[in-house]
Amino acid sequence: MGTTTRKITESTGTEFSGLTGTQLVDKGVADDALAALEETGVVVFREADIDDESLVAFARLLGNVLPLPMGSHKIKEIQRITRDASQSKLAAYREATFYWHIDGTTGEVPDKATLLTARQISGDPEGDTEFANTYAAYEALSDEEKAQLEGVRALHSFTASQLVANPNPSPEERAAWDRNPTREQPIVWTRRNGRKSLLVGSTAGEVVGLPADEGRALLDRLLAWATQPQFVLRHRWTQGDLVIWDNTGMLHRALPYGPSSSRLMHRASLAGEEAVA
Ligand SMILES: O=C(O)CCC(=O)C(=O)O
Ligand SMILES: [Fe+2]
């Protein structure tokens, strides 16, 4: 098929080239993608040019595809990621994606993976997407730091993630944010298979049992640790690229693009398969 595969950085990312559109909707391709996702956290299909129907069909080969009710899109499994309010009801919230985060941390089971494909790009380097490997970041802590974090828990909320982008909301905005659930999660995420990662990011606002400033300082320190260059993969989009990330082991963020940018991504999400222990 003329397919090529390469590792992108030492710890993170696998790039597949030479597969487009319906060629991706194939059990063998999906199994290869899942294996690469498990091993390297991010999978890139360069210039995949996959349409929405095939994207959903491919996503179904990878896991349980979540319906995205606020998607304002004719296919309920596809969400548009854009700052253009005429294309998405959630456009006003997109500034929060400019800060490192993990999707679905306030849910009982965070999303397993996200698929994002570039329908329209805005030009370099605006709107690149970065990923930070939280397995590698955990692994690189000293034994003493690992021991100190055991059992430490943080509170995750939509409000915390919005406050980073918009620290002075109106009372109405704040009340709307606060209607979303808050969830306590361990800072060290231990999988059934024993693998561990750091569960941090902009949704984490407080550390349980610590004064606000001490908790904030610990969370800031851990996020700075996890997003050091050696753990980060930066993706520069070409129109048609499809990128998939292991949402349980990768922080991610978009590099800021302007409110009138034409950047448009289509996204599908896979339901989580393992609650955070
Ligand atoms: O637009 C991007 O690059 C990432 C957006 C994001 O955070 C997401 O789709 O979960
Ligand atoms: Fe996200």
Image (tube, helix red, strand yellow):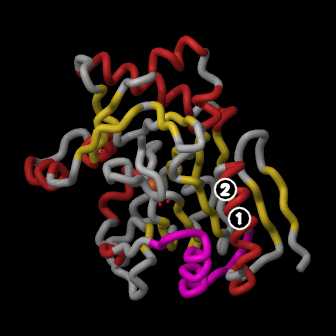
Query: In the displayed structure, does residue 262 sit left or right of residue 165?
Result: right
Ligand 1 within 8 angstroms of badge 1 C-beta? no
Q: CA distance from mark 1 to mark 2?
A: 6 Å
- Is residue 51 covered in magenta? yes
What segment is highlighted magenta in the picture?
46-65
Q: Residue at x 38, y 75 (%)?
A: 67
Amino acid at the residue labelled 2? Leu
Ligand 1 within 8 angstroms of badge 2 C-beta? no
Query: In the displayed structure, does residue 211 sit left or right of residue 195?
Result: left
* Farthest-out residue, left: 171
Whether residues under marks 1 and 2 lie with C-beta atoms below 8 angstroms apart, the answer is yes
x then y, percent, for residue 233: 67, 45
Residue wearing tag 1: 33
Residue 262 seen in the current view:
no
Amino acid at the residue labelled 1? Ala
Residue wearing tag 2: 37
Label 1 Cα neighbours within 10 Å, binned few <14 / some 14-19 / many ≥20: many
Image quarter where the C terminus lies is top left
